[in-house]
Amino acid sequence: MEFADILDWPIVAEDPLSFPAAIPHAALFLSDESIRQALASDEVVVIGRTTLSRSINAYIAQTNEVIVIDPRIETVDIEREADQLFTEIPHVTKHATSAEWSQLWESAGELSSAVIRNEIEWSEQLAVRAIAYNLPDESALFIGSSRPIRDLEGFATPRGAIATFANRGLAGIDGNIATALGIATRYERSYSILGDLTFLHDLSALVNLPKVNHTIFLIDNNGGGIFSTLPQAGVAGFEAIFGTPHNHNIERIVAGFGINVIRVKSVSDIEREIAQRPPGVHVVVIEVPTRSDNASALKRLAQSVSSAVRIGNNLA
């Protein structure tokens, strides 16, 4: 944060819950090529690994100079490429930027926030946004792979005082419950957001639970929701190959382990569950629209964000 304060450049964070100064919803508005071009930069500093967001990676790719800061390039990521590579944060001095350009970033974030506040309806995205907004300070949050991590990046309001964790990599679905419960042993209060397939993939972690206070928010859309937002949506055999509905009653499965479980259907339900802070391990099953309905709503919302940023900044 000291490094960012000195540079005073716009911050784009995959984890907006750790960076209150981050530009909100950048993953959404940068999906518009004309907006990416208007916000183009001569230099980008990437700390750690880049986000999974295609739009932000596209923004980085168009930049003249990419500077990477990541200690892992000495050991596990030795083929990492960039114009400059650092294994620790270098000493810097303030690097002046255009006030007009900086204001354009701020405006894009503000306009996007307004659209989301006014237009977002009950969905996976609103559920994740509500959880992130209402978590108590100094708690920990583990984010599941696929849609949850992307929804946090795209829709959560930047804030601080939350320790955020996620499993990354090709096998990111593996061991999510176990990872979340391990993290919970180090925090008085912790939470996780998992998709239903991710949850079912690691059910054995519910055996011999540690003595922790952990709430699992489980997005129940009966399958792999992320694939409905990708180009293969609607192809022949989609449900069997990509959608993979489980068709199980998750409450019964959880109750079979002797774990407290409840189903919720609204933001107010989520707010109530967080405010109650029940002891032990608690599972909150979040009932959301169908995967196809969610994908359609997500597309409409992204288009509204793009239009608002374009019009608001005379980019249309």
Image: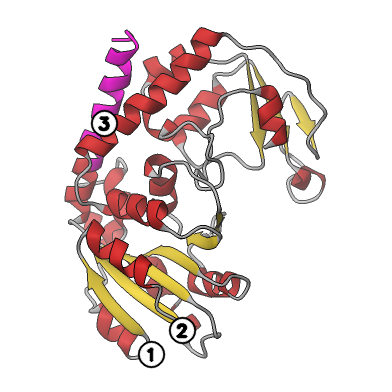
The residue indicated by pointer 1 is 257
The residue indicated by pointer 2 is 206
Residue at 28% of width from left, 10% of height from top? Answer: 316
Q: Is residue 175 visible?
A: no
Disc 3 residue type (three-letter): Val
Q: Is residue 154 left or right of residue 91?
A: left
**Pick the front one: 269 or 204:** 269
Within 10 Å of disc 3 (Cα), the crowding (few <14, some 14-19, many 20+) is: some
Image location (x, y in percent) of residue 41: 57, 15
**Pick the front one: 234 or 94:** 94
Please state the extent of the stretch shown in magenta in the rendering: 298-316
How far is mark 1 from mark 2, CA to CA? 7 Å
Q: How many marks?
A: 3
Q: Are marks 1 and 2 in contact (CB under 8 Å)?
A: yes
**Mark before the other along the chain sequence, 1 or 2:** 2
Residue at 51% of width from left, 86% of height from top? Answer: 209
Q: Is residue 303 magenta?
A: yes
Within 10 Å of disc 1 (Cα), the crowding (few <14, some 14-19, many 20+) is: some
**Pick the front one: 194 or 231:** 194
- Residue 195: which quarter of the image? bottom left
**Mark before the other along the chain sequence, 3 or 2:** 3
State whether the magenta stretch is mostly helix, strand or loop: helix
